[in-house]
Amino acid sequence: MGRPLVYGADYSVYVRIVRLALEEKQVGYELVPVDVFAKDGLPAWYLERQPFGRIPAFEHDGFRLYETSAICRYIDEAFPGPALQPSEVRKRAVMNQLIALIDAYAYRAMVWDIYVETVSRPKEGLGIDQFKLDRALTIAATCLAELSRLKEESEWLLGDAITLADLYLAAVFGYFLRAPAAGPLLAKHSSLTSWWQRMSERNSYITTEPTT
């Protein structure tokens, strides 16, 4: 089989999730640069791969996919290596619930409304939307409490083996924990703090660190 192609930018949380999955499966791949913030916009050829203009898109031996959840599940099931989805039906359901939680609530609040507001915007000389930030801090606190409640008493979120849920959360935490307000929120949840220490030292996480 040929090397998979991942279309996107290394700064993207969702591109990183796909790359983390490939790294965990030890699958060689090529990252094809696509910048959604480019001054001239997205190239027309990319919209043929992802008609909604988001990243990532994916191709493997002529088979094309978009949407991170679909891509990651394909990677797990199409390639050899350690499974990234629990085999037990209820544990797999909790994994899907954790991913949905991160998608629906944590990503926006932690990355765009906390990291971007308090780190990226000040670097550009822009002000902080305090209402947006306050609302996001409340959502982030709820997310962390629920993640802590759902986490098993083990190394990873769902047991002794890493799953896609760990990869999703790691990519979000990569930005969230650069924000000054993040540390005190995370400090209230010792199990997540320990989880983060292990995850941030993992080779897949280090290898996919954004360069931009």
Image (cartoon, rainbow, N blue to C red):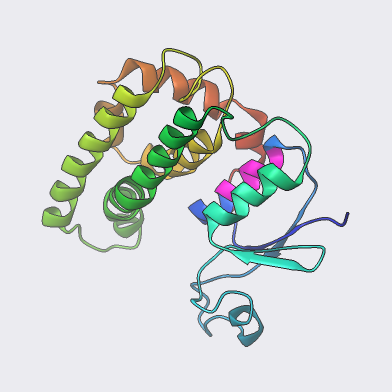
Q: Quadrant of residue 79?
A: top right
Q: Residue drawn 28% across and 48% down?
A: 114
Quadrant where the N terminus is found in the figure: bottom right
Pick out the residue farthest to the left.
131
Above or below — where is 88 with respect to 132?
above
Q: Main secondary structure of the magenta part?
A: helix
Q: Position of residue 30 (x, y in %)?
A: 76, 57
Q: Quadrant of residue 8?
A: bottom right
Quadrant where the C terminus is found in the figure: bottom right
Q: Position of residue 6 (x, y in %)?
A: 68, 60
In the depicted view, which residue is nearer to us: 150 or 13? 150
Q: Quadrant of residue 189?
A: top left
Is 97 left or right of 74, judged from the image as shown? left
Q: How many marks?
A: 0
Decide if residue 8 is in sight here.
yes
Let me know if residue 157 is in the magenta part: no
Above or below — where is 149 with respect to 51?
above
Is 212 left or right of 30, judged from the image as shown? left
Above or below — where is 152 with respect to 135?
above
Q: Residue drawn 53% across and 29% down?
A: 200
Pick out the residue farthest to the right.
1
In the depicted view, which residue is nearer to us: 181 or 151? 151
Pick out the residue farthest to the top.
153
Residue segment shown in magenta = 17-23
Decide if residue 208 is in sight here.
no
Is 81 left or right of 71, judged from the image as shown? right
Above or below — where is 191 with respect to 112?
above
Is 126 left or right of 2, judged from the image as shown? left
Q: Residue drawn 20% across and 61% down?
A: 127
Let me know if residue 19 is in the magenta part: yes
Q: Position of residue 170 (x, y in %)?
A: 48, 37
